[in-house]
Amino acid sequence: MVEVHLWSGLRSLTGGLEVVEVKAATTGELLRELVRVHPQLQGPIDAGVSVAIDGRVIASGLTEPIPEGSEVYLMQRLRGG
Amino acid sequence: MALDDRKSEFSFVGTRPDRPDGLDKVTGRAKFGADTSAPGMLHGAILRSPHAHARIIKIDTSKADAHKDVKAVVTRADFADVPFKPGLEGEFWNVLENVMAGDKALYDGHAVAAVAATSALAARDALKLIEVEYEVLPHVTDVDKAMAPDAPVIREGAADYSVPEGMHPNVVRYHESGHGDIEAGFAEADLVIEDSFVTEATHQGYIEPHACLGMLGNDGKGELWCTTQGHWIAQKTCAALLGIETSQLRVTASEIGGGFGGKTTVFIEPVALALSRKANRPVKVVMTRSEVFRATGPTSSASMDIKIGMKKDGTITGAQGIFRLQGGAFPGAPGDMTAMCGFAPYNLTNVHQVGYDVMANRPKQAAYRAPGAPMGAFAVESVIDELCNQLSLDPIDVRLKNAAYEGTKASYGPRYERIGLVETLEAAKAHPHYAAPLKPGQGRGVSCGFWFNHGGETSVSLALSEDGSAQLMVGTPDIGGSRASMALMAAEVLGIPYENIRVTIADTATLGYNDVSHGSRVTYASGLATIKAAHHAVDKLCERAAAKWGIPVDAVKWENGCAVPSGPNAGDFDPMPLADITADMGSTGGPISGHFEATPEGAGVSFGTHIVDAEVDPETGKTSITRYTVIQDAGKAIHPTYVEGQYQGGAAQGIGWALNEEYIYGDDGRLQNSIFLDYRIPVASDLPMIDTVIVEVPNPGHPFGVRGVGETGIVPPLAAIANAVSNAAGVRMRQLPMSPPRILAALKDNG
Amino acid sequence: MSKFHVSTTVNGDTVEYLCDPRETLLDCLRDKLNLTGAKEGCGTGDCGACSVTVDGRLVCSCLMLGVEADGKQVETVEGIAEGDILHPLQKKFIEYAALQCGICTPGILVAAKSLLEKNPNPTEEETRYWLAGNLCRCTGYDKIIRAVMDTAADLREAS
């Protein structure tokens, strides 16, 4: 299981939870599982999210492996100038 | 990739050779957006709304259509029917609506119709023949007013999932994040300062106006030449807006005369193509400077409330920020980025940040160098400076005490990998500038700044020639010397001279997809892809050498541009130079190329610290920057001179933003300063030399340790200058730009 | 509107063109003579990207009409190098990385050359004020000023 830390703005979509546990080995699985467990997270995920795994920000890749026990944060998709 | 595996000894990287395109650019032969033409070419011109907010009742183009010099007129009906979606999900719709107005004109300068005619003058004249009937609506241009209950609604249904109920429809995206217990944090503090700050919208101010030449047939096949930071995004967006297949539109990027984020989207390109499709002739469209200001992406304006608590020893106990950003009549103002970056330099136990994306009757904001970060840093770092002043603490010591380092939980959530903030602060403290005496009337300011940096989709192809030279094709337009750094990285891997590598910015038909030159990603991502593509070619070179020598390929390694036998199963052979292998490659297995396609993840975040001295004339309110030092972590500087150039350029743009530049709207909602005379960017006589210190804390996510350097340099200046000016004038400046009238007013209020 | 016939000299070559009386010298250089080195950054004389000299005087070619060039000697960035020999300013701009995007470079080179012809030993302040009419958004001017002053020093040494 992976503990996913959400940004606090998402609490209203997860019944107040800021940490959600899902079973996932990759970033893609993680996003799919998040939506399965909390369907309202579809909105932010469609709008674009990045996933930080032990501090490494995965901007958009869905195939990045998530090692057991890693610290995972969901972040808003980054944009640049 | 572990730190130990990374290359740290270099032959080419870190040197400062002449850029490959230098000759073209000093002789006038480099071709920029407006420097091309085609047989049978028409000239396009765009009719723009004079109103900030108006319903378009009717557009009568019949007189223009009938004019002999006019070959096509287009309105919104000539574009594809792109579906509307809320927030940024509907970005194609947002761009289309911006490129050509639908039911309403949403800002002064919004395109409503366009013509193509036989000359530029004829096109301009023909615009006067188009009659538009408007119903003028109430408008709003200020961010705080746009959020007020009585503000005119710009578009219902534009808000996405994130906006809490009960907010005005002009609030279209909402971000909230942080950790700890913010109230407990404030309770622990010896001093809490709460203050509000405002920044005005500024423009990227690239000297080259948008320009393009488009050709599209009714067979759905087209060609587009344009000045852009990313021709694949131009290809994809134009195809969507015109209802054609992406691959049928070939886009070539011209040399680009500055972008800074403003050329990451399209404005005139779909219009030129729509005109061309209708006229069945090539159409060139070139914006005037006034069109650039009125209708292309300024940055967001911002209104911000900051509250920070500090102990007497300088420890920050709690930090809170509310950041409201106005991004024009469309979703996209980076309030989320402002919120996530504002406190990112610091190791905070209790932090809370809120960001708003607010629509107003202004042009659609576009990215501008670390979009969202500079304004947040201005507000946050001003309050930290004031806390230092009131607690009599040294501003660099306080920042060092609170600085984030590897393992710190970032204000936006995750823990940092290896970062270089502390190193920039230590370098700032040790720099002679920080110890230099100030003259009466001068003040010194410091500020830190943070930016995420970006990776993005990247394709690179490298082909070797028989004579041993190499052609490198990259897909990221060269906005500041990147051909030089790409050639250096390829030379490093191949071991052939820098001069033997020709770097070309490939068009969309000759290379796979590439994300835009933005997010400080070019040296990082195209660089990484270049290194990998070169390694791919080297693998093949080693295979050919192994076959010639009749030894296993794992007994061959690549050293200094030669295949050399290595290991117990290798024989005794002289090194075989690259050119000896390529000379007969056609008969030893065929042409040798290397390529790499991926979305590199691991751009590595970036920090900088700036020191500024400013002098304020109490009689005129004019500020002079007397000394400026930029210290920033580059990870690894590939071509240090161009890294310095990025630092200096970011600082100079920051100086403009801090002191002069602003979008000024009249009560009628019209932009009042749409030429360079009135929108004054820094000129040579406004600035001092800008000193730079390149700190190198390698990025674990890049083979040579590169971190992007393009954007972070504009994050600290607003705050550093505001702190210097506030310290010089003895009054806290809370609004940018700190133009002479604002400084005089502040001095007067202060008695 | 009928067009005017203009006969002028550009970079030493005799040239002729027909132009509308509303067209600027910049339009004529770029669109009729295909000399696209001079750029239009503003069209209002504020950015200097279109700098050329006319009878030795530095002007913004966007502020001069094409018809006014009749009988004059016009020099543009394309005429700065002598054959395949770059002008010392051109070499120094490359060496110092005094350009990033390069859009302002033609105008700045024309203006800097004009400065050094009038004042072979400019101070930093004089250089900055002379070039104050040429906007550069990329470099912060640091490397441009250094390149111009260092070229001036080299030229003084050589003469």
Image (tube, coloured by chain):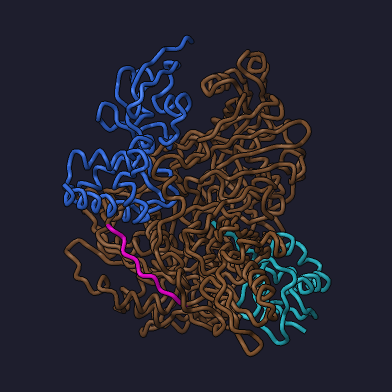
Identify the residue at the far right of this view: A36
The range drawn in magenta is B689-697
Give the prevailing secondary structure in the magenta stretch.
strand
Residue C20 is drawn in which quadrant? top left
Q: Is residue B242 left or right of residue B602?
A: right
- Residue B691 magenta-highlighted: yes
Q: Which of the chains is blue?
A: C
The chain coloured brown in the image: B
Horizontal and vertical percent position of residue B585: 66, 62
Foreground pick, B232 / B62 = B232
Provide residue B737's location: percent of width, then percent of height.
Answer: 38, 52
Chain in cyan on the image: A
Relative placement, left or right, of B17 versus B528 is left
Q: Is residue A30 left or right of residue B626?
A: right
- Is residue B211 visible from the viewing direction of this image? yes
Does residue B354 appear in this view? no
Relative to B337, residue B416 above or below: below
Q: Residue at x 72, y 42 (%)?
A: B239
Image quadrant holding the C terminus of chain B, namely bottom left
Q: Quadrant of residue B273?
A: top right
